[in-house]
Amino acid sequence: MTSTTVPDTFRFMVAGYAVILVGLGLYALSLVARFRRLKRQEKWIDELEKEERSKKGGQAQ
Amino acid sequence: MAETSAGGLFRCTWAVVRKDLAAEWRSRELLGAMLVFALLVILVFNFTLQLDLPTRAAATPGVLWVTFAFAGTLGLNRSWAVERERGAWEGLLLAPVDRSAIYLGKTLGSLIFMGILEALVLPIYSALYNINLFQPGLLIVVLLGSVSYISLGTLLAALAIQTRARDVLLPILLFPVVLPVLISAVNASSGFLAAAPMDQIWPWLNLLVACDIIFPTAGSLLFEYVVE
Amino acid sequence: MIRDRESRGRLALAGAAVSLLAAALGMVFWYAPREAVMGEVQRLFYFHVSSAWVAMLSFVVAAVSGGLYLARREPTWDLVGISAVEIGVVFGLIAIGSGSIWARPVWNTWWTWDPRLVTTSVMELVYAAYLLLRQGLEEPEQRARFGAVYAIAGVLTVPMTFLSIRLLRSIHPVLIGSGESGTLGGFAMTPRMLETFLVSLLAFTVLYGALLVYRVHLAVRGRGLEERRSALFMD
């Protein structure tokens, strides 16, 4: 029976897991960034709506 | 009152087919373009691949099906573009006709055009490469493969021409989805050409038949959502 | 407030996903044994297959929500569809990337015509085509409708593609570096490996659920924002 040594494929495992975890991480981060942008835009629209309402209130008088 | 009986469906389908055939017969632009395109594809393969004789024989099914797939997109795009150009699109949709009839009619029409193209390409290829392509097995595969290809293509072409990019999108939409059909068709053709034993070819034929059932059915069911 | 309950639910799901993922990672590196033939790279198996599984699952989710949209015409189903496609693309790329890296030391090539790898790649192409299709349409209603039709057409083709490529492999078993007609990196699974695999699969599925829920929430809120914006600027 021939004795075979286990090949050293450690680097590839690391590279593979880097791809997986970095990929997942980047996507999660993109979601975070997009949520932040959304909240900023919502706040902006809130301001605009408040202006519109106060303008309309002024006109009604 | 919309025609929903089976007889009505058949008559409407046939009316659509006749319309397209008659229109093409008058101008004959489409078939001419498809034929020239197909021949060019074969020529390009010949000069770029530089195959020796035995390899060329082995590559024949692949070259043939790639040729059909590419030339086929021309026909598929034209089949819908013509309606839009002549303003017949709205007319077609306003007609009190079951949408499936339009889909089946278009599919059959395109299938006939594809068949004519194949009937011209096969003898030319046979002559150019000295390979007999007129074996019953191969011809059956060509038919089976074309049915799936055209039924998928008709549905997706209707999608494509309604986008900004129009025709350009059809190959992008069609090729990933039609891949199993092409793989099966190429392998079945290859089997017949190499006179392989039938039990090697049956699995591919079965896949083709399955595709021929699934894709036209899906197409006729989904089509009405494409042309609302 | 309902809003708080929903966001707490999302947060809980995210928490579960992260903990399961951490547990799975722990098992992958410290619980699962080292495989004798391939060495450490075999450990990629757990997350590679789980990613591919999620990519396929997402494909089905996209098609089902497409069908639901066509049936009910509620815009939310369309938002689920586009979210599922987006997440599916990400997991598909991860699966293909990790698969390629795994193939390199094992088969001495960056690519193998393994049925699952090829099917996943074809699926990615269908996803990409889906995104291009939507991009080429201006009306949101058309985008939703056409997207739904294409997602359904795409999902029908995936099993056919897989069957055809697997058939191809069984007839031509001797491809580059492949000693067995089996799929990528065939090896015998010990009980510990199986346990690690199941935990990884669960972790990825829960992670998928969390990402999907957040992505759909983003889409729904984005749509609300658009409506408010157009209402504001109509006056």
Image (cartoon, coloured by chain):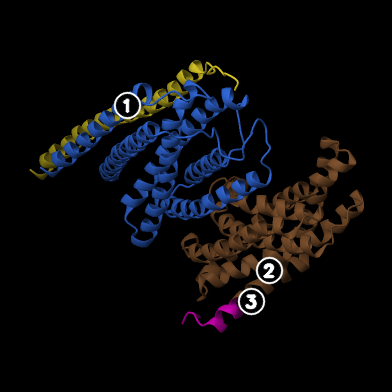
Chain colours: A yellow, B brown, C blue
Give the quarter of the image for residue C72: bottom left
What's drawn in magenta, residue-wise?
Answer: B1-12
Residue toward you, C30 or B93:
C30
Q: Position of residue A1 (x, y in %)?
A: 59, 22
Same chain, labels 2 and 3: yes
Chain of residue at mark 1 = A
Q: How many marks?
A: 3
Residue B35 relative to residue B70: left or right: right
Chain of residue at mark 3 = B
Name the residue tied to disc 2. B20
Report the residue at 50% width, 16% height from top.
Answer: A11
Name the residue tied to disc 3. B15
Name the residue tied to disc 1. A33
Residue type at the position of mark 1: Ala
Q: In the rendered view, would you say C69 is above or below C166?
A: below
Q: In the rendered view, would you say C102 is above or below B102?
A: above
Is residue B38 a member of the stretch shown in magenta? no
Q: Position of residue B130 (x, y in %)?
A: 92, 51
* Label 2 crowd (10 A; few <14 / some 14-19 / many >=20): many
Chain of residue at mark 2 = B
Quadrant of the image for the C terminus of chain C?
A: top left
Residue type at the position of mark 3: Ala
Label located before the other in sequence (2 or 3) = 3
In front of the other: label 1 or label 2?
1
Same chain, labels 3 and 1: no
Q: Position of residue C231 (x, y in %)?
A: 26, 45
Quadrant of the image for the N terminus of chain C?
A: top left
Q: In the rendered view, would you say C111 is above or below B76?
A: above
